[in-house]
Amino acid sequence: MRIAISCIIVNYNTANFTLDCVASIFDMHQSTEAIEVIVVDNASEKKDYLLLKTKLQQENFPNTKLIRSKQNFGFGAGNMIGINAASNCEYYAFINNDTLQLTDNCLWILKEFMDSTPDAGVCSPQMLDEDKKFRSTIDHFSSLSREILKRSFLEKVNPKKYPSRKNFFHKPTIVNYVQGSFMFFNAEDFNEIGGFDTNLFLFYEESDLGLRLLKERKKYAYIFPETQYIHFKSISIKKNINILIKRELKISLLYHTYKHYGFFAHQFLLNFLRIRYGLTSIVKPKYFQLFKLLIRGAHLSESLKQKQSLKKL
């Protein structure tokens, strides 16, 4: 049987979450013959990788592959490694490893929706937290107005253009983009726009994909609330590297701004952030290194991607 849906899951030092995620896919779907699961280990520590490999072999999940990367190339690039190993299919499901399926036959329901919605390029179920309570699943494209005026203000002054992220939608709805923890993509559209921009190590991948999908394919992102999933959220990001994550956020943001809005928007935002964090670092010295990064221009050359070492397989 031809594969219809390729599920791509990236693991980074969280093998037990990944195993639960894979198990939930097979547990919640009556028919899995046309579903494949590709797990990409993004250069985890050897102990974690061996646990993942051993348990996957023991469980013997059908149509499941494990690929080991020698280096942590980041979220987008890790997913692209999975794409390169995927079958020629109709849909890609990019699923965070810290998620669990909640809706019976979720992937087939999403496929049916996408099949019947020609202007849909990507969709997502409603995200819930580990207590099955509402969690925001949508967001607005990154832009100067979003970064300077902030989301809440934009949602108040123009709710039609900026629907509240705190809304629980009751029907399929067009949004700017859906969160990267569960993105169900039309494979043809994804391939035509070139997939993930691997210059982004972490953050803003969804905004970038959504903008390119709209510009290049005239396709939209939808939230599809009839299906739901649990997301444990950022379990692979250690809290003690908080300032490094903030640095990466700014590097990705400025790259994204230059790419989609041009030089002048990039320079305006860069100078705005310099002033903001220059003042902030006076009262919060821990932000001084972030201020120094911005003074240097926060280039991609300073991304965490450049600091990853090769792992022995």
Image (cartoon, rainbow, N blue to C red):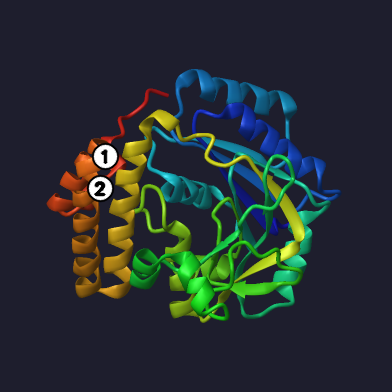
Amino acid type of the residue tagged 2 in the rendering:
Thr
The residue depicted at 71 percent of the width and 67 percent of the height is 169
User: Looking at the rendering, in which quadrant would you find the C terminus?
Assistant: top left
Indicate whether 215 appears above or below 98.
below
The residue carrying pointer 2 sits among few (fewer than 14), some (14 to 19) or many (20 or more) residues within 10 Å by Cα, namely: some
The one nearer the camera, 226 or 163, is: 163
Query: Dot 2: what SS?
Result: helix
Q: Position of residue 170 (x, y in %)?
A: 76, 69
- In the foreground, 53 or 220: 220
Residue under circle 2?
280
Mark 1 nearby-residue class (10 Å; few <14, some 14–19, many ≥20): few
| Residue drawn at x 52%, y 47% as measured from the top left | 82
Answer with left or right where residue 42 lies relative to residue 15. left
- Residue 9 vs residue 263, the one in the foreground: 263
State the SS at label 1.
loop
* For the residues bearing labels 1 and 2, Cβ distance under 8 angstroms: yes
The residue under the point 70% across, 71% down is 114
State the residue position of label 1: 284
Q: Please name the residue shown 38% across and 68% down the image.
A: 149
Q: CA distance from mark 1 to mark 2?
A: 6 Å
Q: In screen coordinates, is 217 left or right of 150? A: right
Asked if residue 205 lies left or right of residue 65, the reply is left
Residue 253 visible to an observer of this rendering: yes
Q: Count all numbered tags in the image, as a single digit.
A: 2
- Quadrant of the rendered structure where residue 88 is? bottom right
Residue 186: give x, y in percent of width and height: 60, 67
* Residue at the outermost left position: 296
Residue 257 placement, left or right of 150: left
Position in image of residue 108 (x %, y %): 78, 59
Image coordinates of residue 163 in percent, x first then y, are: 58, 73
Instruction: Kindly identify the amino acid type of the residue bearing the numbered disc 1.
Output: Lys
